[in-house]
Amino acid sequence: MQKGSRVLLLSVESFEKLLLWLGVWRIGAVVVPLDIELNAAFVADLVTAAQPVLTLVHKELDGHALMGGKPFVSFGSYSGSAGDANARDDFFAGMPRCVAGESITERNEPDDVAAMVCTSGTTSRPKIIVYDHCFYWLNGLSILHSLGMGADDRMLEYRSFGWNSAQVLSLMPFLQKGLTLHVARPSRTAASSSGSPATVSPFRPESRR
């Protein structure tokens, strides 16, 4: 995997999607996440346009049908403990854990391409939009400013990773700004956040249940 390589990510909305997205960024590659719900009919054409060097497909999806014979790597559920890893899920089971972040050389520059995302295609065929890392950083800066958040504030968000609003307007830009991310699956969110009072708690409407 070289700096600037494109990694196509076909996934249900899950923790693993976020994990892989950030991993692709960490090694200086470009993530190309396709929204299966919106873009399923156009996946083959979008793959041809994106020209990824690697395609990752969640095991709950029919990768063969979506990719039309093109090669891909399947992945399933991630476990933080190697002992709990699913031996049948070769992608995560064989992955090393506890790798020190400082051992991975920083490879991204502000004007490097960060992601290639697609429009919904509801009015025409989907179009690919290219974002660089500076775009995410500037969005993070503007959102933090609009919320009036400072270094001592905490934000608790309940949302999926499926929509660009989650990626473009908060989660990814906040990471670009150097904020610390604590991720919990939905069943653990309340317990995980109980000791860390939030300054702001935004919800996506369908997530507030």
Image (cartoon, rainbow, N blue to C red):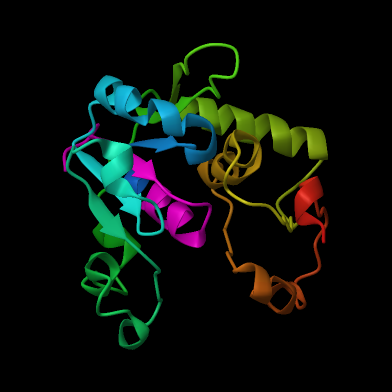
Q: Quadrant of residue 186?
A: bottom right
Q: Residue at x 50, y 61 (%)?
A: 15
- Percent of width and height locating residue 105: 25, 50
Quarter of the rendering occupied by the C terminus? bottom right
Quarter of the rendering occupied by the N terminus? top left
Number of marks present in the image shown: 0
Q: Considering only vertical position in the picture, is 67 above or below 85?
A: above
Left or right of 148 in this view: 3: left
Q: Considering only vertical position in the picture, is 131 above or below 62?
A: above
Task: Identify the residue at the far top of this view.
Answer: 124
Query: Can residue 28 be seen here?
Result: no
Q: Residue at x 25, y 61 (%)?
A: 103
- Percent of width and height locating residue 32: 37, 34
Between 111 and 69, the one lying in front of the other is 69
Between 108 and 167, the one lying in front of the other is 167
Q: Residue at x 47, y 25 (%)?
A: 118
- Percent of width and height locating residue 204: 76, 47
Task: Identify the residue at the far front of this view.
Answer: 65
Left or right of 96 in this view: 163: right
Query: Can residue 50 be seen here?
Result: yes
Q: Residue at x 36, y 43 (%)?
A: 9
- Percent of width and height locating residue 11: 43, 49
Residue 80 sits inside the magenta stretch: no
Range of residues picked out in magenta: 1-23
Residue 20 sits inside the magenta stretch: yes
Between 107 and 188, the one lying in front of the other is 188
